[in-house]
Amino acid sequence: MICTTAIDIPEKKIVKTLGVVEGNTIRARNIGRDILAVFKNLIGGEIEEYTKLMGESREQAFDRMISEAEKLGADGIVGIRISTSYIMANAAEILVYGTAVIFKE
């Protein structure tokens, strides 16, 4: 499956638009990561535990979007965007969305 943030792909011709596809996940922090983050916050630097958590969340949401596109019979997804929203204390939603398309063979 071809996935891109671009609206089109120069070497491919879009022959059918199947609609918007999306994938999301909501993740919460945990006390173990929070304790480590407090120490990092005191000395400065990247909080690797949260970086890993958010990376895993984006990957899961992206995989869910691809799965939705595959169910529609898409060859690719164009115009992909990622959004993060604060849901409640210690929880965030990651939403990945784009347009499922079929390319000319």
Image (tube, rainbow, N blue to C red):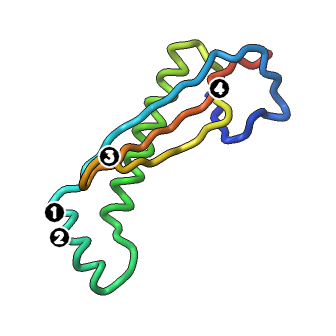
Which of the pair 93/37 is nearer the observer? Answer: 93
Residue under the point 41% across and 47% down: 85
Q: Earlier in the sequence, mark 1 or mark 3?
A: 1
Q: Is residue 5 left or right of residue 32?
A: right
Residue that carries the numbered disc 1 in the rendered image? 32
Query: Tag 1: Cα neighbours inside 10 Å, few (<14), some, or many (≥20)?
Result: few
Please say if the residues under marks 2 and 3 sit with CB atoms less than 8 Å apart: no
Question: What element does badge 1 sit on?
Answer: helix
Residue 32 at x, y percent in the picture: 16, 63
Q: Is residue 45 left or right of residue 97?
A: left
Question: What element does badge 2 sit on?
Answer: helix
| C-alpha distance separating marks 4 and 3 | 30 Å
Viewer-nearest of discs 1 and 3: 3
Above or below residue 63? Residue 92 is below
| C-alpha distance separating marks 2 and 3 | 21 Å
Residue 7 at x, y percent in the picture: 74, 35
Residue under the point 33% across and 61% down: 50
Residue 87, labelled with which disc? Answer: 3
Instruction: Say which quarter of the image contains residue 79.
Output: top right
| C-alpha distance separating marks 1 and 3 | 20 Å
Could you tell me the amino acid type at mark 3?
Ile
